[in-house]
Amino acid sequence: MTRAEAPFAYDGLDRVFHERARLGIVTSLAGRADGLGFSDLKALCGLTDGNLSRHLQVLEDAGFVTLDKGYDGKRPFTRCHLTETGRDRFAAYLDVLSDVLKKASRATAGSDTANLKVRPA
């Protein structure tokens, strides 16, 4: 099926990003070239240690973030960074999401779906 035949399919909405916690994590990291510490990221996203760890693992497995582990004095410290691939893929995701929002806005105003021809089932 082509994009013209299914204009609301939104194949570009990557499921790795399209989850509330991961969207918050990546958005937090997107504007910080030097990354964020685990504790700061946890506070910004309102997540528990375990929940943040799990979501970071998903993002790391996808190649979208890297985790640098070390010590700050005697305390363990983890710094999270968005990779170049993660940054590129997130920008592409945002482009598709922007398209979704534009179409949804027009549809709620009644102008985007009125002229669509739907094949009978």
Image (cartoon, rainbow, N blue to C red):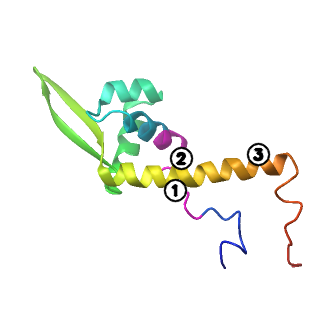
Q: Is mark 3 in CB contact (under 8 Å) with mark 1?
A: no
* Residue 50 picture location, percent across and down: 38, 36
Where does label 3 land, which residue?
A: 105
Question: Horizontally, is 121 left or right of 20 in the view?
Answer: right
The amino acid type of the residue labelled 1 equals: Arg
Amino acid type of the residue tagged 2 in the rendering: Glu
The reply to whether callout 1 and callout 2 are in contact (CB within 8 Å) is: yes
C-alpha separation, residue under disc 1 versus residue under disc 2: 7 Å
Q: Does residue 107 appear left or right of residue 29 in this picture? A: right
- Screen quadrant of the C terminus: bottom right
Mark 2 vs mark 3: which is more N-terminal?
Answer: 2
When asked about the image quadrant of residue 34, the answer is: top left
Tell me which segment is drawn in magenta: 11-23
| Of 19 and 101, the residue lying toward us | 101
| Residue that mark 2 sits on | 19
Vertical placement of 117 versus 90: above or below? Answer: below
Between disc 3 and disc 1, whose residue precedes?
Answer: 1
> Which of the 4 image quarters holds residue 43?
top left
x%, y% of residue 4? 70, 73
Q: Nearer the viewer, residue 79 or 95?
A: 95
Q: CA distance from mark 3 to mark 1?
A: 22 Å
Which residue is the site of mark 1? 15
Q: Is residue 53 magenta?
A: no
Label 1 element class: loop
